[in-house]
Amino acid sequence: MAQSTGYNKIKTAVFISGTGSNLNSLIKFSRLKKSPISVDLIISNNHESKGLNYGKIFKIKKKVFDFKKKSLTEKKILVELKKNKIQLICLAGFLKILSKNFIDTFKGKILNIHPSLLPKFKGLNTHERAINNKEKYSGCTVHFVNSKLDSGKIILQKKVRIYKNYTPEKLAKKILIQEHKLYKEAILKIFSP
Ligand code: GAR
């Protein structure tokens, strides 16, 4: 994995599908001196992603790809990543599943944030499933991406208590606050000398 030295921060692309609150938090972090990464590219599968606005606000290049033909799309994305000398990919609410081929091309250089305490509740609707399962705790996980869904090596996790009156929406909000802290901590953990 590339290390950041002085002004040469690790060139990072953030992949999003929706609101982009994790993207916003990563961009703000990336602009701090202590950050080993710089966010240089935003990629989305969805023109309607609210998160694309952060590209405008922070003057970061953004690209939208429809995933109708996945392997072709992934090839185009790889060209874009190369063009921008991207060294690290952070998935942040990106709801498409990347192919093994794509992941192998960027092996060990793709991170994901997932809203559960993995290995529990892989996939979607994590909050609803945690509540229905009467879990006392849920939380979030940052992990390396491998070709199995939400199964790569775990970097860091944060726990959130689930109280009796919690709806999936309430739990999602509580966890999202922790996600914003966790992603930065995970990046610092990986890249600290
Ligand atoms: C976050 O909770 C993230 O963990 C989740 O989507 C949300 C995106 O929020 N990701 C997944 O569910 C991936 N399987 P954001 O767009 O505000 O960052």
Image (cartoon, rainbow, N blue to C red):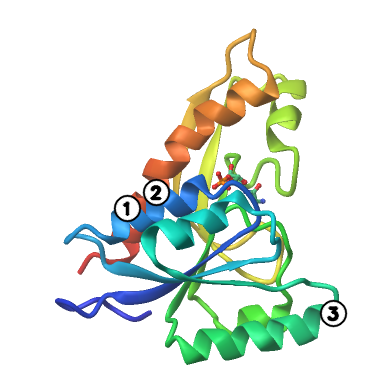
Give the camera-side residue of 1 and 79.
Answer: 79
- Mark 3 or 2 closer to N-term? 2
- Mark 1 or 3 closer to N-term? 1
Label 2 CB less than 8 angstroms from ligand 1? yes
User: Any mark on residue 25, and which?
Assistant: 2
Mark 2 surroundings: few (<14), some (14-19) or many (≥20) residues within 10 A: some
Give the camera-side residue of 45 and 109.
Answer: 45
Tell me the amino acid under the disc marked 1. Answer: Lys
Left or right: 149 as drawn, with respect to 79: right
> Which quadrant of the rendered structure holds the C terminus?
bottom left
Marks 1/2: CA distance?
Answer: 5 Å
Residue at 60%, 30% (x, y): give it.
172
Left or right: 131 as drawn, with respect to 89: right
Q: Which residue is situated farthest in the top direction here?
A: 165
Marks 1/3: CA distance?
Answer: 33 Å
Mark 1 surroundings: few (<14), some (14-19) or many (≥20) residues within 10 A: some
Tell me the amino acid under the disc marked 3. Answer: Lys
Q: Where does label 3 land, which residue?
A: 69
Q: Which residue is situated farthest in the front direction here?
A: 56
Residue 186 visible (yes or no): no
Give the image location of residue 192, x and y in percent. 23, 64
The answer to which quarter of the image holds residue 155 is bottom left
Residue at 51%, 36% (x, y): give it.
176
Give the image location of residue 88, x and y in percent. 44, 75
Is mark 1 in CB contact (under 8 Å) with mark 2?
Answer: yes
Q: Where does label 1 land, which residue?
A: 28
